[in-house]
Amino acid sequence: MEFTAIIDAKARHAAGCAVVGIYENADLGIAARQLDKHLDGYVAKLCAAGDFAAKLSDTLMLPLPPKSELQRVLLVGLGSRAGFGRKQYRKAVLASAQALAKTGASDAVIYLALESVTDLDVTYRARFVAEIFAAQAYKINDLKTAPQPKARRLTALHVAAADARAAKSMAEGLRIGEAVGSGVAFARDLANLPPNVCTPTYMGNRALQLAKEYSSIKAKSLDESAIKALKMGAFLAVTQGSDEPPRLIVCEYRGGKKSAAPICLIGKGITFDTGGISLKDPPAMDEMKFDMSGGAAVLGTLRAIAQLKLPLNVVVIVAACENMPSGRAVKPSDIVTSMSGQTIEILNTDAEGRLVLCDAITYSRRFKPAAVVDVATLTGACVVALGNHVSGLMSNDENLAAELQAAGLRSDDRAWRMPIGEEYVDQLKSNFADIANVGGREGGACTAASFLWKFAKDLTWAHLDVAGTAWLSGAQKSSTGRPVSLLVDYLLHSAEAR
């Protein structure tokens, strides 16, 4: 879809559909008032008659006579004017996208960004339009043999600004939103594929394809022999029960000065997680194809920042493998030696994400990173703690934690700070090794993050547990692409700060 910013405060732009907002109590928004003048008071009369209550997310399509420059007008309810903030704005934009998808309009102009939105500047208003419309247009890459539905007719969306200055800011917001939408779609495509298609090798190949698409990216996909040479004993323990070979995917994006330290993004890439010998319960095990969502998210973020040509150096690392039970699989009570040299007693083979991540964190040290952020569907305990709305955030650095939390708020891809510390590491004591990989049910998300913290010593490090936010279950089962939006926002502001 093509997104453009236009200057049109008087609602005169000819298009297949004009999207205008109306508040409750027949209170016309900025563009609705202007449009009403062209239509001889038709909109005001309709609202005064009670035919459109303008509750938040209400929509009403008005087909217009042939003589009108517009083929349609879409009225969108904005709810209370006094309570119109970022949440209400996003809901109104989403309602617009859903309503337009049901029409034959090939282009539309949306006037909602003209309205005053509490705590949301014009750049973010435009960015959210692009992100929401891109998400609404996304189609799951299913393997159904039935005829595919026809492509949506809407191919061009114009966002109206009041003046040239606002249009310039909106154009930048649309550029960012379009890149975020592209990165989210990339991550969702990877995660939605079945695990017999999206194998570790497949993930590695998709990373190599990204490097061919963008000259700013260099990528390599290390095979099992190379991983063994790196002495990644924790990573290799997870994969040893599978017939699928593992891959350590390493991508370097160079957009900043050669001497500038990169930010490292590390993703958990377990392309299917049975739990290993500590086998999971069968219900919902099919959803364990989404256990590589952290890896998909950091690769999607890489695509977005390459599209944006962000002036920053970023390294993306994905530890990709399967966790399967077999005669070769790692067993509870096995002890392995990580790349850092620390020994780990594996008490539960279903706590495998922290094993691949600890070696990836150690590997990241060779890049002398300014910061390291790992992303993983790590613990069911985080889902219990935070539900499916907010990702868990743990960090050993106050500034990095604050930056990520602020990025989550700005992008509406929120993360909530949770604690780590020696008291949680104490739960991981082992009689036989330096550390155990589990520490009981209590504080499960915090003990998992504290395990990683021990391997991130002297690094500026943060961990995002996206077990509750990376995908939807039930009838809407699919990847969400989170936290690509958060990560891109964090990197955008990091680039500005530098």
Image (spheres, rainbow, N blue to C red):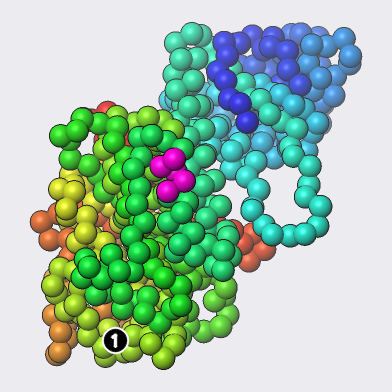
Q: Is residue 60 above or below residue 38?
A: below
Q: Residues within 10 Å of mark 1 (few under 14, many from 20)?
A: some
Predominant secondary structure in magenta?
helix
For the point 48% across and 34% down, the residue is 179
428 on left or right of 275: left
Q: Who's the residue at 55% across and 18% down the image?
A: 5
Q: Is residue 45 magenta?
A: no
Q: Nearer the viewer, residue 250 or 377?
A: 250
Residue drawn at x 28%, y 52% is: 373
Q: Quadrant of the N terminus?
A: top right
Residue 440 shown left or right of residue 10 in the figure: left
Residue 201's x, y, as percent? 45, 62
**Amino acid bearing label 1:** Leu
Quadrant assignment, res 224: bottom left
Q: Residue furthest right?
A: 66
Confirm whether the magenta stretch covers residue 210. yes
| Residue span colored magenta | 208-212
